[in-house]
Image (spheres, rainbow, N blue to C red):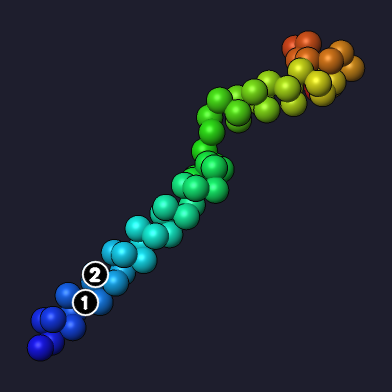
């Protein structure tokens, strides 16, 4: 009897996890948000758009001293 109860609880957890996963996938957004290509583009845009310590935009090699 206890074994059946434990098996039912495990089955309920698996079904809940599967339904949650399907709901996340249907939303269309990234599941983890770890889009490396977007992170690289964002870092490059931030670097190229921000003036460095020499006052020139995009990393003119200034040391900041």
Question: Whole-percent x and y of residue 18?
Answer: 35, 58
In the rendering, which numbered label is found on residue 11? 2
The residue closer to the viewer here, 8 or 56, is: 8
Q: Quadrant of the N terminus?
A: bottom left
In the rendering, which numbered label is found on residue 63? none
Mark 2 neighbour density, 10 Å: few (under 14) some (14–19) many (20 or more): few
Q: Which residue is mark 1?
A: 8
33 to 48, vertically: above or below: below
- Residue shown at 18%/83% (left/top)? 5
The residue closer to the viewer here, 42 or 1, is: 1
Residue 9 visible in the picture: yes
| SS under mark 1 | helix
Question: Whole-percent x and y of residue 39?
Answer: 60, 30
Residue contact between numbered discs 2 and 1, judged by CB atoms under 8 Å: yes
Where residue 20 sits, quadrant-wise, is bottom left
Q: Residue extending furthest front?
A: 26
Question: Whole-percent x and y of residue 64?
Answer: 81, 22
2 to 49, vertically: above or below: below
Estimate the spatial distance between the alpha carbons at disc 2 and disc 1, rounded to whole Å: 5 Å
- Residue shown at 60%/25% (left/top)? 40
- Residue shown at 13%/81% (left/top)? 4
Mark 1 neighbour density, 10 Å: few (under 14) some (14–19) many (20 or more): few
């Amino acid at each position: 009897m206890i074994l059946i109860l434990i098996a039912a609880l495990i089955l309920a957890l698996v079904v809940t996890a599967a339904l949650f996963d399907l709901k996340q996938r249907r939303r269309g957004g990234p599941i983890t948000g770890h889009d490396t290509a977007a992170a690289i583009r964002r870092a490059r845009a931030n670097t190229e758009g921000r003036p460095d310590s020499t006052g020139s935009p995009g990393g003119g090699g200034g040391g900041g001293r």
